[in-house]
Image: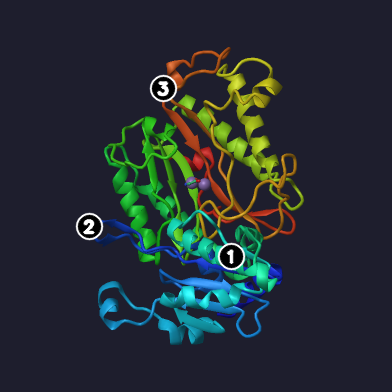
Amino acid sequence: MEIYRQRREQLMAKIGNGTAIFRSAPMAVMHNDVEYAFRQDSNFFYLTGFNEPDAVAVFAPHHEEHQFILFVQPKDIEKETWTGYRTGVDLAKEMYGADEAYSITELDEKLPQYLEKADRIYYHVGRDRAFDDTILQHWQQQRRLYYRRGTGPRAIEDSAVLTDPLRQIKTPEELELMRRAAEIAVDAHNLAREIARPGRYEYEIQAEMERLFGVNGGSPAYPSIVASGGNSCILHYVENNRQMQDGDLLLIDAGCCYQYYNSDITRTFPVGGKFKPNQKIIYELVLEAQKQALSKIKPGIPYNEHHDAAVRVIVEGLMELGLLVGDIEEIIKEEKYKPFYMHKTGHWLGLDVHDAGAYKHSEEEWQILQPGQVLTVEPGIYISPFLKPVEGQPEVDSQWHGIGVRIEDDVLVTETGCEILTAGVPKSVEEMER
Ligand code: GLY
Ligand code: MN
Ligand code: MN
């Protein structure tokens, strides 16, 4: 609870005379009354540690009595029999450190007192339309009152401006969980390499990996991708139902969520134990692209540089193979490599797999890497048989078709450079073969 308290303190210091409102995740209904597993909204969890749906957290540092207010589902033994334990109003104060707590049914009655002296409302519009309406109605009411009272919020600002910069720098406690999430996924990837064989099905590998997540208290961070043969060229392939053949590459993109924190790892290796010559060429190219990208992960370097480094290696390599022709600077500038490499080299990682935080601050100004940030570094090359070459570029010879390679690691920016949190899964050509 002390960790959440510190986070709230940091948040409050940024709110000034505003009031910030955070909504929990809704309980998602699948169909016919069957519920998806509940997963708390990441910002809500980050600030409260509170793990129930239908809750609202309000932060009003300027308020005389209450700065942190929780609205929660009230105790209801009958409902709890169906839908699980509720903390309830009384314990919400005691257990979660709120200065005041109310039943969520009292929101409309109690919220105005926390808005009337605020100069703005921080709230993330657009995620929960029904709740947006509630907030907009309160805002309208406060705007009307402003003309006689002289106080009240005049603007609504995205609450992400408060939480993004906090979430972007991971604390030692967060890193401990991220290391564990990484470690479990590392073990799962190492297991996958041991058990993948021609004749087995992609879903068998998925099941064994996810079993390891489960018995270690984790779960899949996102739908696991186990993509053999030509499936490796489909970025978000999730069917995982093909029988693997000798001669296939197997691309596995699977990460573990452990106590809300995520890992995200991709490895690509030959199912039969030996790369074919063309597969090996593409694999080594992606590996070199990742190496060059990783050399650009240190404090003070703009966020775009590792992507640019990876693109340059990939373009140079594809030109050498005759898969791209022309002037290298023009190919890069006009992104003519995109049929082969259509995604970016990574993303922030944390409570969300694609974690909170900006990559750019203006058209020209990239985020500068700082110690405590965690990002993925994941270059790839995908040579789909259905590829449409860019004008002026050659047809791809069928000997390359169906080769898809991605190598993805999770990287912490440190004071002096970076630390690869997922280094426990090998990636050299020799280690991917057997
Ligand atoms: N597995 C999701 C990603 O790599 O971004
Ligand atoms: Mn990723
Ligand atoms: Mn991934």
Residue 273, x across and y down, in percent: 40, 37
Q: Nearer the viewer, mark 2 or mark 1?
A: 2
Q: Which mark is residue 219?
A: none
Residue 406, x across and y down, in percent: 50, 38
Out of 284 and 33, give the one closest to the viewer.
33
Marks counted in the figure total 3
Out of 210 and 6, give the one closest to the viewer.
6
Which residue, given by chain and number where applicable, does mark 2 sit on? 32
Q: Secondary structure at mark 2?
A: loop
Residue at position x 52%, y 38% from top? 429
- Give, as a three-letter code, the residue at label 2: Asn
Residue 1, x across and y down, in percent: 55, 80
In the shown orientation, is residue 19 left or right of residue 209? right
Residues tagged 2 and 3 counted as in contact (Cβ below 8 A): no
96 lies above or below 317:
below
Which residue, given by chain and number where applicable, does mark 1 sit on? 175
40 lies above or below 381:
below
CA separation in Å, label 2 and label 3: 41 Å
